[in-house]
Image (spheres, grey):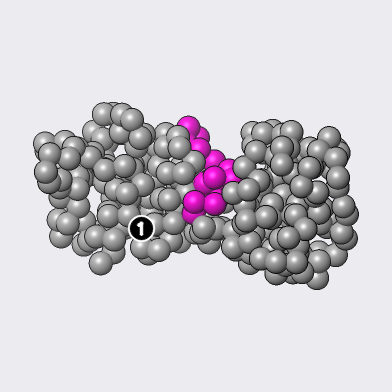
């Protein structure tokens, strides 16, 4: 269902041009809201994972070019979903549009699983506490998917994995790996027989390459805020405190880079 839009003030563009991501997230409250997927690869991975599109916004060039596969698939699978083709004038004021390779798709959120459901069916999980940057969240998801982690848990202070930048940086892997929000519930981890490992630069920590970590049948890797790391009270409750050894006076890695190293070592 193709519709042409020539005016930036057209109300059909509201969810793309005039609503921020927290507003989209709660647009149908108490039901789940929307998120914006950008770029053909991210949109296709969301569709593969079963997410339902609400509308598509594209430009004339992408409609017949690199976005053609997306618009054709949505037109075939969801014939009632509108595909808006915006003029250059209508699109140039939408911030970030040029970063999307010409295609944006508003998609319906789904109910998140319970944390216990994820723990019941996994062995290696990462728990993010107060990771604020959506780019870091997206990069951690990408590393978790690539390095054989089974799931991602996030405290509610973390950036939303379905925010545009997070999903884009994850290259759509946020749709492939189970995730949900949870409290820092160490009783729940023990109930499902998980040991916990805090990633922290402490003198009494063990190396990420310590064999005892790979020998654990079930393990939760806990990673903290970009600026101040993990809170001491969280570290104190963990079974292990783990660090990545550094050279040349480097004190730490970015949390996303550290996640890639940790996941690789633990699963190699």
Residue 224 against residue 51 in the figure, above or below: above
* Image location (x, y in percent) of residue 239: 23, 44
Which secondary structure is most common in the magenta stretch? loop
Residue at image location 33% in from the left, 30% down from the top = 227
- The reply, left or right, for residue 187 in relation to residue 203 is right
- The reply, left or right, for residue 44 in relation to residue 178 is right
Residue at image location 71% in from the left, 41% down from the top = 92
Neighbor class of circle 1 (other Cα within 10 Å; few <14, some 14-19, many 20+) is many
Q: Judge by depth and name the residue closer to the eye, 238 or 192.
A: 238
Residue at image location 54% in from the left, 45% down from the top = 165
- Check if residue 168 falls in the magenta segment: yes
Residue 132 against residue 141 in the figure, above or below: above
Q: Judge by depth and name the residue closer to the eye, 61 or 157.
A: 61
Quadrant in which the C terminus appears: bottom left
Q: Residue 119 is drawn in which quadrant?
A: bottom left
| Part of the protein shown in magenta | 156-170
């Amino acid at each position: 269902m193709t519709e042409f839009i020539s005016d930036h003030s057209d109300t059909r563009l509201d969810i793309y041009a005039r609503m921020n991501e927290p507003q989209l997230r709660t647009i149908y409250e108490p039901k789940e809201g929307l998120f914006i997927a950008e770029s053909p690869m991210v949109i296709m991975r969301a569709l593969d994972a079963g997410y339902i599109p609400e509308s598509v916004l594209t430009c004339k060039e992408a409609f017949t070019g690199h976005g053609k596969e997306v618009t054709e698939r949505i037109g075939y699978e969801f014939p009632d979903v509108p595909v808006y083709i915006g003029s250059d004038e209508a699109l140039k004021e939408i911030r970030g549009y040029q970063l999307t390779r010409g295609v944006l798709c508003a998609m319906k959120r789904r109910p998140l699983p319970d944390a216990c459901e994820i723990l019941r069916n996994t062995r290696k999980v990462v728990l993010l506490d107060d990771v604020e940057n959506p780019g870091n969240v997206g990069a951690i998801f990408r590393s978790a998917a690539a390095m054989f982690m089974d799931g991602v848990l996030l405290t509610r202070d973390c950036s939303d994995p379905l925010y545009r930048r997070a999903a884009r940086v994850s290259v759509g892997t946020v749709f492939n790996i189970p995730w949900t929000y949870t409290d820092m519930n160490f009783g729940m981890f023990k109930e499902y027989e998980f040991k916990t490992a805090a990633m922290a630069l402490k003198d009494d920590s063990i190396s990420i390459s310590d064999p005892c970590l790979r020998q654990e049948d079930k393990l939760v890797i806990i990673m903290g805020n970009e600026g101040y790391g993990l809170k001491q009270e969280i570290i104190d409750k963990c079974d292990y405190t783990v660090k990545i050894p550094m050279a040349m006076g480097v004190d730490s890695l970015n949390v996303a880079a550290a996640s890639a190293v940790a996941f690789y070592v633990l699963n190699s």
